[in-house]
Amino acid sequence: MIGQVAGILHGSAELTGDLDLLWDGDQAQAEALAAAFVAVGSRLIDDDGVPVPTSPDAFLLPKVQFESDRVSGDCCTPALPWGKLAVRDFLNRAHTTADPDGFEVHYLCRADLIRMRRAVGRPKDLRRADELERL
């Protein structure tokens, strides 16, 4: 996870309305990723707002937006233009947490999340980066 949900896992008090995901973009995993999004009834759209089929090809785009009855957000890959950020390295430094049943969630480390927020530079991102630095 990236975005504010990752921030919340680091102690941020600011809530969010979406779930932003980053995966490594490995084509061999696209089929399983598509199956998972189908299983939760997600609808996908590209960056231009055009609906795309929930298929492995959709997840080979640099970014696809998803929406289901319970959650919406972005699913990004390192192929998205991230400027000078080496986001593939972020994946290697991500933290992992698990529930009692062993379901694992990976989320950006605080320093990488701060870097990402500062690079985006929107007022809300800068505010959230400042908060993370104070924690």
Image (cartoon, rainbow, N blue to C red):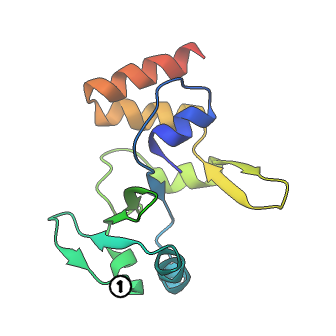
Q: Is residue 41 above or below residue 133?
A: below
Q: Residues within 10 Å of mark 1 (few under 14, many from 20)?
A: few
> Image check: 48 left or right of 63?
left
Q: Residue at x 41, y 38 (%)?
A: 116
Q: Which residue is rendered at x = 51% and y = 66% of the image?
A: 24
- The picture places residue 126, in percent across and down from the top left corner, at 35, 23
Q: Is residue 38 above or below residue 125?
A: below
**Residue type, label 1:** Asp
For image coordinates 82% across by 61% down, the residue present is: 102
Residue 53 in the image, given as x and y percentages of width and height: 30, 84
Taking 62 as reference, is 89 left or right? right
Q: Which residue is mark 1?
A: 57
Q: Give the mark count.
A: 1
> Residue lying furthest right in this view?
100
Q: What element does badge 1 sit on? A: helix
Q: Residue at x 39, y 86 (%)?
A: 55
Measuring from the top left, give residue 30's x and y in whole percent: 48, 81
Question: In the depicted view, which residue is nearer to us: 120 or 21?
Answer: 21
